[in-house]
Image: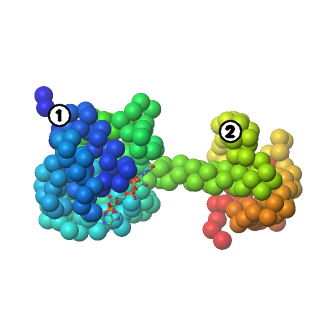
Amino acid sequence: MSKQAVTVIGLGPMGRAMVGAFLDAGHRVTLWNRTPGKADDLVAKGAEEAATVAEALAANELVVLSLTDYDAVDAVLAQAPGALAGRVLANLSSDTPERARAAAAWAASHGAVHLTGGVQVPPPMIGKEGAVTHYSGPREAFEAHRGTLEVLTAADYHGEDPGLAALYYQAQMTVFWTTMLSFYQALAVGSANGVKAAELLPHLSGMTAMMPHFFQLYAMHADAADYPGDVDRLAMGAASVDHVLHTAEDAGVDVTLLKGVQDVFRRGMAAGFADNSFSSLMEVLKKQV
Ligand code: NDP
């Protein structure tokens, strides 16, 4: 049986990796990108380049969108709303759950099905073992196309709500970006003191290797909304954060990130959580100031 043909719109690093994975797996691919010239090597490998968005949408039922964000998705699909009827849009572009829900409603009003996706891995891992994408949206359409989508990555389906895949994805990205920024904060302090990144690396990696243990314990605190101070006290944590901040100040590096962290700890102290675990900061973070 011949493999399902697929359209891919968007040829950034991620879209290009996706086209490559589909071609390697024997799928016919039609592609389109706003800026011309990015498809040449992929066309040489067998992909067909559509001249317009309408042509790309008309080519195949399954359309993978890999764009910077939903503003880009809107800008692309607005070029050919009449070509959307009957299409299944696997939108693997990043944005908020609210944007995903609005996009799903808009697609439905044009006769298309919207599957939200959040890819958990960088482009070199597309088509490789261990890669996973969050999906949500209509189950029937997801199951019908799951096999083809799993050429890219394994699929983690979260249910019919089109916002859920975006929610899971953004939750992970919250940890990713803040962790990576804290990594660079530590390297900046090291660098200002003449310590190279390579020298700090094993110690910082050792710290992050312990994180799953902390996540496990403190997730229980969060779900129970109970923050016992038997292992750690917020007052201790607040003092420790001050030491981290002062070390950075003494090194003369940027302290924007650490001042934000200190602010959250101080608000936890002001709210009376000094003798609770630092996990009580969950109560601070639940509210927008
Ligand atoms: P890029 O931002 O590099 O890709 C951008 C694509 O979107 C290009 O095809 C670009 O077209 C197009 N685009 C942007 N704005 C518009 C617009 N207004 N109109 C039409 N096309 C537009 O992203 P990546 O390829 O790196 O990633 C794609 C998605 O995957 C993103 O949502 C990203 O968050 C997500 N992702 C990326 C990962 C990564 O490591 N790269 C990892 C996991 C998820 P043009 O070529 O014309 O500029």
Residue 274 appears in the picture as rendered:
no
Q: Is residue 251 left or right of residue 85?
A: right
Residue 3 tag number: 1
Q: Is residue 248 above or below residue 212?
A: below
Query: Could you classify mark 1 by the number of other residues whose Cα lies within 10 Å: few (under 14), some (14-19), or many (20 or more)?
Result: few
* Residue at position x 64%, y 65% in the image: 287
- The reply to whether callout 1 and callout 2 are in contact (CB within 8 Å) is no
Q: Is residue 189 above or below residue 131?
A: below
Q: Disc 1 to disc 2, how far (Cα)? A: 42 Å
Residue labelled with disc 2: 205
Residue 257 appears in the picture as rendered:
yes
> Residue 154 placed where, x, y %?
38, 35
Tell me where residue 265 sits by quadrant: bottom right
* Residue at position x 23%, y 38% in the image: 23
- Where does ligand 1 appear, by image quarter? bottom left
Q: Secondary structure at mark 2?
A: helix
* Residue at position x 24%, y 52% in the image: 39
Q: Nearer the viewer, residue 125 or 41?
A: 41
Q: Nearer the viewer, mark 1 or mark 2?
A: 2
Q: Nearer the viewer, residue 119 or 105?
A: 119
